[in-house]
Image (cartoon, rainbow, N blue to C red):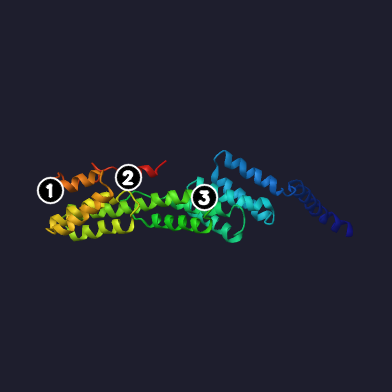
Amino acid sequence: MNARKYLLVLPVALALSACGSKDDEKIKPPESAEQLYNEAISDYNVKKYKNAVKSFEEVERQHPSSEWATNAQIMSGYSSYQSEDYDTAIATFERFGKLYPSNEATPYAYYMIALCYYEQINDVGRDQKVTEQAMQALREIIRRFPDSEYARDARVKLDLTQDHLAGKEMEIGRYYLRHEDYLAAINRFRYVVENYQTTSHVPEALHRLVEAYLKLGVKDEANRYAAVLGENFPGSIWYRDSYKLMMGKNVTPAVKPASENEPRFWDHLLP
């Protein structure tokens, strides 16, 4: 009876033993942080950016206290940026900045946040929320790291971003001018003159103010803005046009269609 019990149990025991030996064969020693990091770099180098993100995240998951984990966070964010997954990249870099406020790579992380917003700036005909986010992020770099190379580049990009927002105001102002809503047009052009004084749009904005006030018959205001234009931009084509208007000469057409004849100023923002 005991022998029968043993014979019945033996196959089960053998099966368990076999399973255990197969599992033992499958078990691999854990990879080092450097090995995992190098695997992630391999994915990055062949432009498998989404795979690279997962691989870099694995470095941090398995070896959170290692120096490789810190580097992996930066590379994970940059891989997301390369795949144009800007939201994930921004979240990754923001997390890095909070975790490592004194790390030597922190200025770079903030710069990449700004760059993610900056590269999403669309043409002036679209919503400008991302442009404003880019401006805020660029100012943050200048405030936090004023002497860094990233701050120098941020200042250049900030000027271009302000130029972009001014272009949006100009487009709306031209629209109102074409549709003879002169007061609304004046408000837009004055906003450009008062708030975007360093941009390339100020000479045209001053000319459009001359044009709009003449349409309303308010010659004193037209003359005032023509004088400001002449004093600050005497060689500008916009001053020549304003001079002709003030002298009673026709300047035709008063407002050229932006889509056909006016240069798209944002072209110089593109690589």
- The residue positioned 32% from the left and 45% from the top of the image is 265
Q: How many marks?
A: 3
- The residue positioned 26% from the left and 58% from the top of the image is 190
Q: CA distance from mark 1 to mark 2?
A: 30 Å
- Give the percent coordinates (x, y) of residue 158: 42, 52
Which amino acid type corresponds to the residue marked 1 in the rendered image? Met
Q: Does label 3 or label 1 sit earlier along the sequence?
A: 3
Relative placement, left or right, of 162 versus 191 is: right
Which amino acid type corresponds to the residue marked 2 in the rendered image? Phe
- Give the percent coordinates (x, y) of residue 179: 17, 54
**Closer to the camera, 80 or 208?**
208
Mark 2 or mark 3, whichever is nearer to me: 3
- Element type where label 2 sits in the image: helix
Whether residue 227 is visible? yes
- Element type where label 1 sits in the image: loop
Q: Disc 1 marks which residue?
A: 247
- Element type where label 3 sits in the image: helix
Whether residue 174 is visible? no
Local crowd size for mark 3, using a 10 Å CA cut-off: few (<14), some (14–19), many (≥20): some
Q: CA distance from mark 3 to mark 1?
A: 49 Å
Q: Does label 2 or label 3 sit earlier along the sequence?
A: 3
Q: Which mark is residue 164?
A: none
- The residue positioned 35% from the left and 45% from the top of the image is 266
Which amino acid type corresponds to the residue marked 3 in the rendered image? Tyr
Mark 1 or mark 2, whichever is nearer to me: 1
Q: Which mark is residue 265?
A: 2
- Give the percent coordinates (x, y) of residue 48: 55, 42
Relative placement, left or right, of 171 versus 145 is: left
Q: Quadrant of the C terminus?
A: top left
Q: Disc 3 marks which residue?
A: 150
The furthest residue to the front: 231
Q: Quadrant of the N terminus?
A: bottom right
